Image: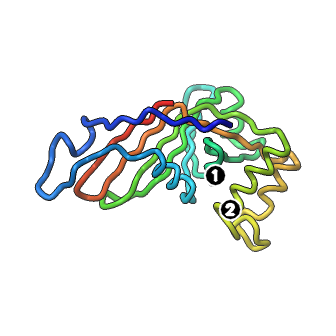
Amino acid sequence: MTQKQPKTELDARYSSALNPRPGAGHVTATDWAEVQRRLEAAEIFWITTIRPDGRLHVTPLIAAWYDGALHFSTGRGEQKAKNLAGDAHCALTTGHNSLSEGLDIVIEGTAERVTDPSRQDEVIGAFESQYGSHITSPDGVFFGFGDGIRKGEDLLYAVAPGTAFGFGHDGQVFSHTRYSF
């Protein structure tokens, strides 16, 4: 997958730049490289998919940023797999639940199945690198993750960003950055 560099724009309507407070720093757009670094370090993501009747389905999962896309897996019979079979549009989010620090990230895109065995092995390696013993240790929460994908018991998806958002907050300065691909 070819990694694209997005057009990056600070949305001043939702950033502290419009309403500076004493002591607040200058607001700038969050660099895409910083977003990628945060995606590579995150442990929990939330995915939003669309049910056949139009209702949303939101659930937590693990995901790995690799080669310009967020990757995740799901069992064949799980609701998100059923939803993606009918509508592959989805959003993945991660971040902090604090106003005093952090960067919240939203990746919007279309989920594509990863079926090539060599590509699957590359992505499984990215998961193992990101989650370590959670996946690689026999005592790990997700031990057997790669085997489930290789056997076809679990489906592997890639979501290349169509649009992404970064919401920075440090208690004094808030920023809203849009990344267009």
Image location of residue 80, percent across then percent down: 66, 40
User: To which quarter of the image does residue 43 belong?
Assistant: bottom right
Residue at x-position 85% and y-position 44%: 117
First along the sequence among labels 1 and 2: 1
**Within-10-Å neighbours for mark 1: few <14, some 14–19, many 20+:** many
Image location of residue 129, percent across then percent down: 68, 62
Residue type highlighted by circle 2: Ser
Residue at x-position 76% and y-position 50%: 122
Disc 2, SS: helix
Q: Quadrant of the N terminus?
A: top right
Residue found at the far bottom of this picture:
139
Res 129 label: 2
- Residue 103 vs residue 100: left or right? right
Residue at x-position 34% and y-position 43%: 29
Report if the CB atoms under discs 1 and 2 are less than 8 Å apart.
Answer: yes
Image location of residue 49, percent across then percent down: 59, 36
Residue found at the far left of this picture:
22
- Residue 117 vs residue 65: left or right? right
**Within-10-Å neighbours for mark 2: few <14, some 14–19, many 20+:** some
